[in-house]
Image (cartoon, rainbow, N blue to C red):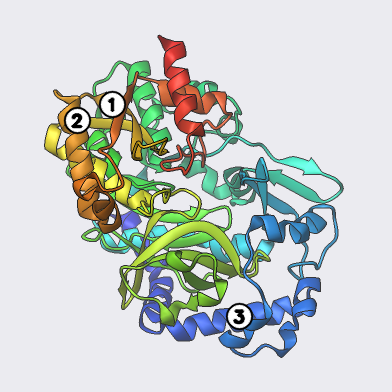
Amino acid sequence: MSFTTHIVNLFFRHRRSEIDFFREHPVQVQELQLKYLLGQGARTVFGKACGMDGIHTVEQFQNRVEVSDYEHFSRFINRTRLGEQGVIWPTPIRWFAKSSGTTDYKSKYIPVSEQGLRDAHLQGPRDVIALFSSLYPDSRVFGGKTLTLGGSHRIEREGETAQTGDLSAILIENTPRWADWRRVPSARTALIPDFEEKVRRICEETAGENISSFAGVPSWNLVMMNKILEYTGKTNLLEVWPNLELFIHGGMNFKPYREQYRRLIPSPRMKYMETYNASEGFFAIGDDPSRDDMLLMLDYRIFYEFLPLASLDDPSKAVPLAGVRPGVNYAMIISTSNGLWRYQIGDTVEFTSTSPYRIRITGRTKHYINVFGEEIVVDNAESAIRAACDATGAEIAEFTVAPIFMEGRSKGSHEWVVEFRRRPDDPAEFARRLDEALQRVNSDYEAKRFKDTTLMPLTLTEVGPGTFLRWMQGRGKMGGQNKVPRLFNERTFVEQLKEADTGRK
């Protein structure tokens, strides 16, 4: 064991015992979280209107507080942004994490309280260190620096009190200064709005550093890593950073990118840890390298509920942790010390275990295709495209899917717009394998495809290199937490991508 890792292990020993406690007593810990939140919420305008001081059980909480999303809850958030305090949380809220918008809003402004920062947003990364140091006691990762690629929205003042920016900008502003010695790039570079300029500056700042770990969204980090290789003239990242050992990733499924990272970092010492963090909070950590899921973190002052995706229009079907079942797609609902109450964040998850409670992210409540009753979620699409790649030797850079609607007597189908990093020898064979794989992972799609009853075979549309990057850039969605929408129930994104590819030609 390295001396530094030994010290880190000792420092986090007590915290690991707390994690073990909620593994063994999950329902009890969640009840304590709700009790604390209700005690704080009873002091707010929102809580008084709901009668929180008279709520003592989960059932009472569900009966008195309605489930909401950003569109419905924004009126309370906006009052706080305009300077009115005590609306949704009893202590002042000054920070608002700016994230991708909804149908009705270009951007969302998620409240971040001092308690929310401390209890979740900053505790999550500390727990990653606590768990990693225990899993890998011989690691030397703590002897180097961490390269973090975050968002680009700087902190902006709104009115007399509110300050908005990407969550990453808020974390940079609130992370202890002593931690800066282990983190690159500089804060000035990290918050450069232009993604390409930021990556150029990162190359300049970090090529000569001892980078032992990096963190961020897999797709954008892949762009940055390839730019690092171009800048240095090296063939893999170990030639640039020989002590590279850990990638802490989140924001999207890592599996489609895993093989590309293995080629970029051909080291048996390389470790990958998935996290589930968002503007609304920090939720889960991949604590077991042998598993393809994450441990749900239960003591971050977050109370969880889960609404079956099949009952998305009936919030009364939401259940607390004790009511979930493995293998069911759930929309996640949270109540937090950031002042969010029964807030549906838009992600869907599936439980892989209930002892302890482990999840994996399956998609978004608004990013799925159900035009013909096929109920395709993101997890289905990513599993199918991975199987098609394995069968044909192809490699995907990006993809998105949309329905082809029925017209006249024609039947419907799906159109997959794909940008290959490595093209299959036979694209038609790739499409056939993709269609078969999708039938294997989704019985509803299989039923609609049976003898072409409702759906015809999918259509594969290939676009040229860089098309998705140009499209995201044109939408102002470069870097940070911005992600390519995988599935959509209408054709706007698909048509825009095809137009962007036509422009290239």
Looking at the image, is 48 positioned above or below residue 360? Answer: below
- Residue position for label 3: 62
Q: Which residue is mark 1?
A: 420
Residue 122 visible in rendering: no
Q: Is residue 152 shown above or below 451?
A: above
Contact flag, marks 2 and 1 (Cβ < 8 Å): yes
Q: Residue furthest front?
A: 409
Q: Quadrant of the N terminus?
A: bottom left
Residue 491 drawn above or below residue 173: above
Q: What residue is pinned by disc 2?
A: 394
What percent of the width, then of the height, locates residue 367? 46, 48
Q: Is residue 188 left or right of residue 408?
A: right
User: Local crowd at mark 2 within 10 Å, few (<14), some, or many (≥20)?
Assistant: many
Front position in the image: 448 or 262: 448
Distance from disc 1 to disc 3, alpha carbons, whole Å, reads: 47 Å
Mark before the other along the chain sequence, 1 or 3: 3
Percent x, y for residue 306? Answer: 48, 71
- Residue 110, horizontal then vertical, whole percent: 66, 54
Q: Foreground residue, 94 or 444?
A: 444
The kind of residue on which mark 1 rests is Phe
- Residue type for callout 3: Gln
